[in-house]
Amino acid sequence: MKRQIFILYAILFLSFPADASQLPVVRVFGEITYEVQLAGGFFSRNRSYEFKSVTQGSGFVLTTRNGPYIVTAAHVLAGPAYLAVVGDGDVIVDLSSPRATLTSQSFRVRVSELSLRPVSIFLDRDRDVAILALSSDDWRQLRTPSFRLWQLSPSTIRSQVTIYGFPGQASAPTLHTARVADIQRDFFSVDQSFGPGFSGGPVVDARNRLMGMVSRSTETHTRAVSQTVIEDIMRDLSSKMSPLTEPHVIYIE
């Protein structure tokens, strides 16, 4: 009987959204603006177009000796490295056309429902990691628990993990369990696929220690950035992420 009650509680716990106030997980929105110039012909003039898209993902708070940061996936903020077609309404522009030129690409970032704007942004496209620094006033508004850099957990094959994220239009984080299926130098994969909204979400072990971050999913598996990559990046940030008056982006090639 006790075993049946335990199983029932476990099912209920895994089936409903977790309490957002008890988790170091946040929603992250990236608003990307593309400005495109389309060259005219003999009977038409040059035209400029502006397109906007909003991407949504997850992120988490990680505290280091230099203070707290928000960690998320780089593609949640900056979009794809290459755009083939952009469009809005009835206007579609093929960027592979010799007539089309992408003149600028910029983005804004919002964290949670408070529309907090980072003062510094670190982007590592190759490893799909973004680090955000907030002002002290924004941290006081956010009031979110955090993981600790010195309490990370390495991944092992078949170990059980929990993944948190904001799928779809969810207003609170949900969680799913999976098992580690493969381990590489900078990444590991788990044996389940997670849809849009989980990118940037934390992967934790049974003791709620950070193991990595969700990067991308295939039809059957999900790739996660390992905790060693996040640790390496965080240790290298102190000289690069000085707070600025306006949002500033630091790219790592």
Image (spheres, rainbow, N blue to C red):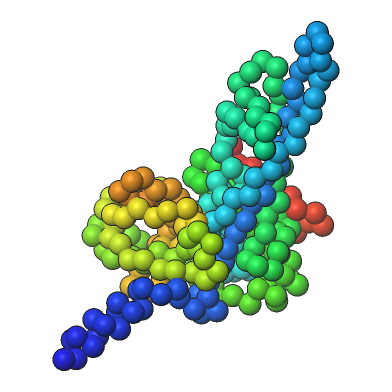
User: Vertical placement of 12 versus 178: above or below?
Assistant: below
Placement of 87 over or under 182, stated as above or below? above
Q: Quadrant of the N terminus?
A: bottom left
Look at the image and tell me in which quarter the C terminus lies.
top right
Identity of the residue drawn at 70% across and 38% down: 51
Return the residue found at the far top.
42
Q: Residue furthest front?
A: 90
Q: Which residue is drawn at 30% across and 83% down?
A: 9
Camera-side residue of 119 and 233: 119
Question: In which image quadrant can residue 10 be found?
Answer: bottom left
The image shows residue 21 at horizontal and vertical percentages of 55, 79
What count of labels does the image hold?
0
Q: Which residue is drawn at 31% across and 55% down?
A: 192
Q: In this view, does 90 lie above or below 108?
A: above
**Residue 193: where, in percent of width, then height?**
35, 53
Q: Percent from the top left, x then y, of residue 199? A: 48, 54
The answer to whether residue 121 is visible is: no
Residue 63 visible here: yes
Q: Position of residue 47 (x, y in %)?
A: 80, 25
Above or below, 142 relative to 232: below
User: Is 23 placed left or right of 247 in the picture?
Assistant: left
- Residue extending farthest left: 1
